[in-house]
Image (cartoon, helix red, strand yellow):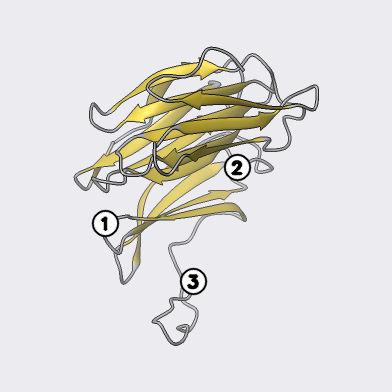
Amino acid sequence: YRTWDGSSFSIESLAEDTNSTISWVVLKPSPVTNEMIMGVYSTDNTLYIQTWDGSSWTSSWSTVMNLSANYRGFDIAYEQNSGDVIVVFSDDATDTLEYRKRVDGVWDPSDQNTGITLGDAANWVRAESRPDSDDIFVGAQTNSKTLFALRWDGTANNWVDQIQTTAVVRDANREAFDIAFESASGDAFLVWGDDAENVKYRQFTTSWDGSD
């Protein structure tokens, strides 16, 4: 890695090592400090989580996802007000969507289940922070082309508002969805390309609307 001080880049330095070839890297900055969380997925099927404290990297934890390195089955998102953070990831061995949260600087000691029933491995996972809120919205696209969404309630620290879309995506090998928010209202949109080559969406206000 290199750091930028406003006028130039530093020399290259090493973050913490992984045990195999790196396939995917996700880096997310804290909204309240100089901290960053990095997730690295390697060909040994392990997700490595590292923390930048403003001056150096340290290893936080790792877990075996069992997912093909062809897919980015994990993501990271911060709560925008508290600065707490969630890492969400697929477990191909159990076909579940798992997570670990860090609240007040303390990580969960082990993988936790989001409670959503996928029925297959989640090839693609996306987590997006709701503006001016501690909510985080997550989408998961499975190897069976099904698409799921759910909301992390950062006030209650639990998962709610879980849905499965009616229309499936066309190709499980491609990330065919995204999540974004209206800036003024904070309403969330889940948008995807379906098997009939249509662009579909669901909107969340205080709950998800009724159909694709």
194 to the left or right of 152: right
Q: Nearer the viewer, mark 2 or mark 1?
A: 1
Gap in angstroms between the C-alphas marked 2 and 1: 27 Å
Q: Which residue is mark 2?
A: 72
Per the rendering, the mark at residue 139 is none
Gap in angstroms between the C-alphas marked 1 and 3: 22 Å
User: Residue 91: x and y, percent?
Assistant: 52, 29
Q: Which residue is mark 3?
A: 1
| Circle 3 crowding by C-alpha within 10 Å: few under 14, some 14–19, many from 20 | few
User: Residue 34: x and y, percent?
Assistant: 30, 64
Taking depth in this image into account, of 104 and 163 the one nearest to the observer is: 163
Q: Is residue 80 above or below residue 203?
A: below
Q: Is residue 35 above or below residue 186?
A: below
Q: The residue under label 1 is which amino acid type? A: Val
Q: The residue under label 3 is which amino acid type? A: Tyr
Q: Which residue is mark 1?
A: 32
